[in-house]
Amino acid sequence: MLTYMDYLQNAFHRATSWDPDNSYVNLTATAQALLDFPTPRGLKMNFSSLSTPKFGTSYSLSNHGVVDGSVSYLYSSLPLHNVHRSAEVDLHDVTTGYRQLEELRPPDNERFWEVWKGGVRVDGRNSLLFGRMYLPTSTLEALYLRRMKPTTQFRITGVSDGRLKSGGTIMAMMQHDFGKWSGEYLYSTDGALIGARGLYNFGRDPRKQPNPPPRTSDEKAVGRFSMGAEFYYGMLNKSAGMSTGLRYTTLPTHPNAPTTMTLTLTPLMGSLSATYAIKAGETASFCSRFDFNMYSYESDLSLGCEVWRREDVEKEDFAGVLKARVSQTSGIGLLWEGRLKHLLFSVGAGIDLRRKDQLVRAVGLELQYSS
Amino acid sequence: MAFNFNWTPLTTSNTSSSAFYSHAKSLLTAALNKSQKPPIIVDDIFVEELNLGQSAPELEILEIGDLAEDRFRGIFRMSYDGDAFLTLRTKVQANPLNTCLSTTPSYTSPMPLAASSPLTIPLQITLSQFRLSGFIILVFSKAKGVTLVFRNDPLESLKVSSTFDTIPFIKDYLQKEIERQVRGLFQEELPVAVHRLSLRLWNPEYAASLGLDAHDPDPSSPIERSEDGSGDDANAAFTNPLLSPSDNPDTPSIVFSQKNLAALKALSEAQKTLSMRTPDISHAVFRVWASGGGSSSAGWERNVDAPSTPVGSQAYTFSDTGEAISSPASISSSRHSLASSMSLGGGASTPSTRARGKKRKHRVVNLRPAKESPHSDPAPDKPTTVPTQATSSSADRKEEELPTPQTPTSPQPQLILSAPATTASPFSQEEKIIFESPISPTSSIATENITYPPTSPSENRRPQLRTGSACSSGILEQAFMKKLANEMQKRIEEERRKRGVMGGASGKMWCDVERELAGVGLGIGMGMGMGMGMGGVGAPPAYRQ
């Protein structure tokens, strides 16, 4: 389940019409949501509120052996009117699952962002500020997000922690999204890491053809083929890494069941990962992933699914979702996310069948209330 | 003087050695995995193979600065050129980006899609061809534990071979990195570990703070002995029975008699005030007297130290207090304290002498061979030298039990005997360490170089022996020593045989008997040797009765 602050950031993206899915990082978002979902540990409670459309707070308290918590504040220069309380939020917005990609949208015309008043341009750039303090470790996380242009977003994240090598790290990232392609350039102070990643979508260029062509025949599959790559180089520790990936996903106009296939390669390390996800109807999605390393011959097969439970068959109202995954290396994971009255809850467990003495590794319950 | 390690039990493939090796492996594995490993190592480190090789390290006493029931200070030279090897097995993370990002907090991580995918590679590292050579300064005090310092970098060379030998870059990197780690181990971590362990053994407060039994490790357990050879020769300190309190349960702790304390107090007050009267403390020798003859001691030093190897002269840059000695006078003072060391065996019959003489008496027994070491100069009569084997039965011989020498006139030849005897008694608890009496040519050279610097008040009583003039007497001494050593050996063998006949006789009794015997032999040797060497020359002040 997404934290309230992640939910607010997604709302900010929606409000500023930024598409996080059109990024190389989220190439395998569907498989990750279905196979790598985290299961809660211990008891965790979140109390959040958007006191004004621009300001949100969240307090969390968790207990897994030790009691700790965090206090978060978020400020958005753009009023977030698309945020709902926990009693009425759509569960799809606060959970991750099969990610149905939409048709590519052309970036906004920069002119539309201009606001003129009395011959003077008065529009500002929307930005988001976020800070979270963990107690009692006094770890501070901070985020500054600035929507600079319709195609550009600037993002700085920082962590201040006395236990870190130099007291903390900062990462700055410039993100571009032109629809047809997207790119991200980042610098992290941890090891002076520089990185670049990009995603290119084959097919129609939304800037030239803003509207998808009308479907002429049902035989022609409507999908999108994307390809991307990433490069990193740590200047201080002279470590480099790269990967490349492909994705094919069907679009909403596709007549058959929505399907996403990805293939990622890490040529230097010889690892290969192939995923296949299908959304079988409104209520169920299935995903499989095969990992293989051609140098060490290590392999892993993961299977996962999510099943939605309708509260009312007539209405499009869901009571909760059950997620399950099984993998050769990480065992079984179970997660039930739903709503109980005004509370969002998430119950999960991790089971490792290889260790008989400690079969159930992590059991947890997470509660969220927001107003 | 050198140690003769009995290495054969480790090399033979009997059950005890295999049990020892498996125990050592498990201990080493635990030690390697105890501390937090770098993120590049993704699995436990297993000790795949451990072999201490066929040859033992060489350990040589260069100098014993202080020796008492509760304290010890000495300088050793350790060298190892054997075929021990150690094979480690673990798994490493081959993706540098994964290693790099594993330490960064997830919030600021760039979250690569697949670039940080792990690739674990099994790694096997073999460390072999250890070449060690170093000077060990060992200071033990019952209150402060064992301080062990490597004066120099003991690691001369080391061969690292691994799974990645075909890749020169990784090979060089591993070689460099592991050499650095091993150097750090010898120079930093090992002294700390030894110190902590010794504190745990002898400092009940520290042990209590750890919640451990103060005397739990058995000093003669096989694993600790093994560490002598596996490169951790410094760990010999663990097995040193001198340092083990449990072996000498009846050893008195530091006891100052009220009389001595009063005398010392009077002395110290006399120097603080303008009192004209300095109390006379009998049977005491002061360093100030010794440092008077700077010229002669300088000459002595020229004669002896100049030809010695740079390595040897390095050993002389330390005083028994641990500070570097620069001036010849202070060297002579430490030389002179050689004289007081003679009271170890002989003068010990009057224990109060020592306590009264100085609050803390420094005894320096210099056993460092001169340049003509037996390796370079094969001694003509080497084969005839019978090693005086001080076995375990002659353990914890106490000075009080030694008979008084009849005429402790000269300390000179006594050095040969007293040195192994005094040092052997603590060390010989270790069954595997067998002490040999020093090869005669070297030792005689060393002893003949003893110079008592003349001091103004009693110059006529101070003998001065120069290297050149002492040659003839050296031969005499050698002959006497050989005879004496033979005699002692014979008697010990006799006793052994008797013990063998008796079979079930209690070991403790025989320990005592042998100790007694050795003490007798020592006393006789000392007395006679002194008589021969010094003739009618008066005894140094330390022996004034």
Image: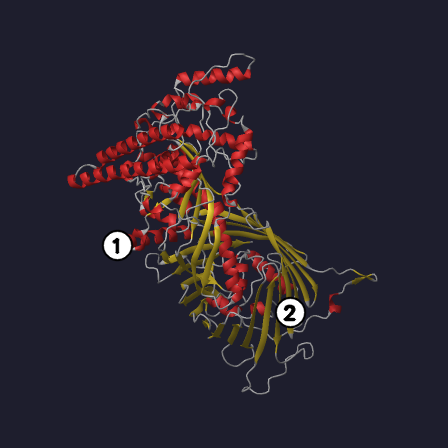
Specify the amino acid type for callout 2: Gly
Give x and y (percent) for residue B516.
26, 31
Callout 1–callout 2 Cβ contact below 8 Å? no
Q: Is residue B164 left or right of residue A212?
A: left
Q: Residue A23, which numbered label?
A: none
Q: Is residue A149 above or below residue B191?
A: below
SS label for mark 1:
helix
In front of the other: A138 or A285: A138
Give x and y (percent) for residue B166.
48, 68
Q: What chain letter is assigned to the residue under label 1?
A: B
Residues tagged by mark 1 and mark 2 found on one chain of the structure: no
Crowding at dot 2, Cα within 10 Å, few <14 / some 14-19 / many 20+, comes out as: many
Q: What chain letter is assigned to the residue under label 2?
A: A
On the image, numbered disc 2 is attached to which residue?
Answer: A183
Specify the amino acid type for callout 1: Thr
Crowding at dot 1, Cα within 10 Å, few <14 / some 14-19 / many 20+, comes out as: few
Q: Is residue B227 above or below residue B399?
A: below
Give x and y (percent) for residue A327.
41, 67
Picture quadrant of residue B141: top left
- Marks 1 and 2, how far apart at CA: 67 Å
Which quarter of the figure is the N terminus of chain B placed in? top left
Of tags 1 and 2, the one toward the viewer is: 1
Q: Is residue A163 left or right of residue B19?
A: right
In front of the other: A302 or B3: B3
On the image, numbered disc 1 is attached to which residue?
Answer: B15
SS label for mark 2:
strand
Q: Is residue A239 left or right of residue B448?
A: right
Which quarter of the figure is the C terminus of chain B placed in? top left
Q: What residue is drawn where x is 38% and y is 43%?
A: B439
Picture quadrant of residue A143: bottom right
Give x and y (percent) for residue A99.
53, 70
